[in-house]
Image (spheres, coloured by chain):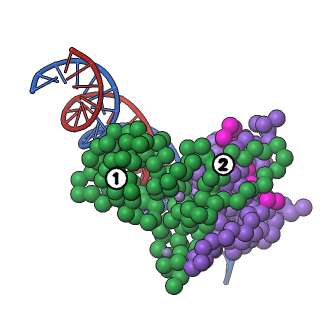
Chain colours: A green, B purple, C red, D blue
Amino acid sequence: METIEQVLESKNIRVTAMRMLIYKFLAEKDVAVTLSDIENAFAKSDRTTLYRTMKTFEDKAIVHQIDDGTGITKYALCEQGCNCDIKTDLHLHFHCNNCKETICLTDHKIPQIKVPNGFVSENVNLVVKGICDKCSS
Amino acid sequence: METIEQVLESKNIRVTAMRMLIYKFLAEKDVAVTLSDIENAFAKSDRTTLYRTMKTFEDKAIVHQIDDGTGITKYALCEQGCNCDIKTDLHLHFHCNNCKETICLTDHKIPQIKVPNGFVSENVNLVVKGICDKCSS
DNA sequence: AATAAAGTGCAATGGAAGTGCATTTTTAAC
DNA sequence: GTTAAAAATGCACTTCCATTGCACTTTATT
Ligand SMILES: [Mn+2]
Ligand SMILES: [Mn+2]
Ligand SMILES: [Zn+2]
Ligand SMILES: [Zn+2]
């Protein structure tokens, strides 16, 4: 089991207090979070720092961004050894119309999508909306 | 061949000058458009009217909204007899990373997506990004 | 023609993303 | 340890788009 410090170091970014806190927060969540979610999780925090931290995390493939159609960008930790950076191996995302949470279905990969002749597919965003397991039971 | 008046009447909305102009503009476009696109297409136009017109069109299944991940809502005319309103029979959308245009691939329906036990899929948003036919040739 | 209902236009608001710059913290060099 | 450079952080501000309140105009109905 890697410590948070080790994770950050292995990704070649500096270990700072804020980054560790944010990473820890993300790791404890099982749903995708917005910048505001993170902001509200800390008594004292600055949007810009969070924004730039998430950008750094994204560049280093520590988190991936999720566009679930709500208009607000969400983030979630990448799985171990994911390939977000090379835009492949992407899983699908589920947005619950009831509780409004968005989660990664990490072991449901996006199927191969056929596009017409002349079109070249580079990557795919797929969001399923409906009722999540917690809300349907 | 139905006239624009007939289309609007058949959807039970009032026929107004602005609505006809907007409908005509959409019909002439083969790509999805933003509110600003429509705004710029007319010498004199008001964002609010366009916004509310598109909302009305959407409610009446004359157009459908497209979230292509750019963060800006786009719209395109529905096909004849589409079922946008009941959230089924949905086609996929393609966003070109080169020309930045987004188009409906109306005869490429979204495949059945498997979700884990306990989850209920109600609808699916699928956007493929890459290079469009015009840009790849 | 009179009235009610619906559509339109202007002004203003709100939310989120993004940026410039000064300050603080971290790292590395001396 | 002290110092200097590089990176991270925090504040203020800007931009862009979505959305709403309200007054005015147009359309449909009698
Ligand atoms: Mn995910
Ligand atoms: Mn479409
Ligand atoms: Zn739910
Ligand atoms: Zn193109």
Q: What amino acid does circle 2 point to?
A: Asn
- Residue to which mark 2 is pinned: A123
* Residue B102 painted magenta: yes
Q: Quadrant of the N terminus of chain B?
A: bottom right
User: Which is more N-terminal, label 2 or label 1?
Assistant: 1
- Residue to which mark 1 is pinned: A3
B96 vs B119, left or right, is right
Main SS class of the magenta portion in the image = strand
Q: Is residue C11 above or below residue B15?
A: above
Horizontal and vertical percent for residue A91?
Answer: 60, 59
Residue drawn 27% across the image and 57% down it: A42
Quadrant of res A36:
bottom left
The chain letter under disc 2 is A
User: Alpha-carbon neighbours of circle 2 within 10 Å: few (<14), some, or many (≥20)?
Assistant: some
Q: Which residues are magenta?
A: B95-108
A43 vs B113, left or right, is left
Q: Is residue B37 visible?
A: yes
SS class, disc 1: loop
Which of the pair A37/B56 is nearer the observer?
A37
B2 vs B76, left or right, is right
User: Is there one chain holding both mark 1 and mark 2?
Assistant: yes
Q: Is residue B42 above or below residue B112?
A: above
Q: What amino acid does circle 1 point to?
A: Thr
